[in-house]
Amino acid sequence: MLTADQIIADLKQRANSQAVEGMARYGIRPAQALGISIPTLRKMAKEIGRKQVLAVALWVSGIHEARFLASMIAELQLVSAELMEEWVNDFDAWDVCDRVCGNLFDKTPYACQKATERCQQEKEFVSRAGFVMMAELAVHDKQAQDGAFVQFFPLIKRYADDERKFVKKAVNWALQQIGKRSSHLRALALECAYEIHDMDSKTARWMARDALKELQSKEIKN
């Protein structure tokens, strides 16, 4: 079985400095980045398989792509609420936040609870993670009832005026994805968007206009 050190050595051999420069243009500036593509990481994850011990070791390395890989090979049943808290507080870029939430966190039994808790935190990427979780749940949790998402609308409205780039985009994303789940949630999302539009905030009005444009562009099929 491969060790974490061997996997990290393999990652470093695949490093692409030009890709790292390209990442920076999209606002991705983690402390340690190698510039490895997502398809390459997915292939590596498939070859490694689900291995929790390796996932934790890769995460602790602090390497951006190693953390992506960790979220792909972690064993869901061994991901505790405490581990999620440790990892979310290590987020240092929007893409690792989104990938970890979409690859792993939204599939845990704590997903709804953690989405509600995190969006109210002060740290930018922790707050973003809460709203990303809402969006990912709306897309991936096919068994959830509409009622599971109604609880998120007051939080979306409360933080609609957050001016931080990586938070406001996630708030918008959450509203749109929830509104796309069903005609009932679409109606509630539109109502929420109109209320946000009436807020005395340039950021909130921008978010509302963008969400309304997307939600009004087509009917949602149940």
Image: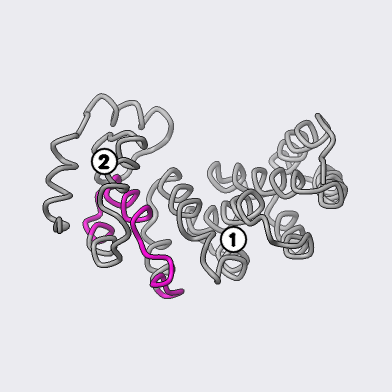
Report whether 189 appears left or right of 39: right
Q: Is residue 199 visible?
A: no
Position of 131 with respect to 34 (left or right) is right
Quadrant of res 3: bottom left
Secondary-structure class at tag 2:
loop
Amino acid at circle 1: Cys
Q: Residue at x 75, y 43 (%)?
A: 180
49 or 21: nearer the viewer = 49
Q: Is residue 29 visible?
A: yes
Amino acid type at circle 2 is Ala
Residue drawn at the location 43% of the way across and 43% of the way down:
95
Instruction: From the image, tell me which residue sits under label 1.
Output: 119
Asked which quadrant contains residue 209, the reply is top right
Residue 73 colored in magenta in the image: yes
Question: Which is nearer the eye, 130 or 177?
Answer: 177
Q: Position of residue 113 (x, y in %)?
A: 60, 71
Q: What segment carries the magenta color? A: 58-82
Q: Which mark is residue 134?
A: none
User: What number is the disc on residue 33?
Assistant: 2
Q: Is residue 55 rendered to the left or right of residue 211?
A: left
From what the image shows, is residue 5 above or below residue 190?
below
Residue 30: give x, y in percent of width and height: 32, 44
Q: Residues within 10 Å of mark 1 (few under 14, many from 20)?
A: many
Q: Is residue 97 above or below residue 76?
A: above
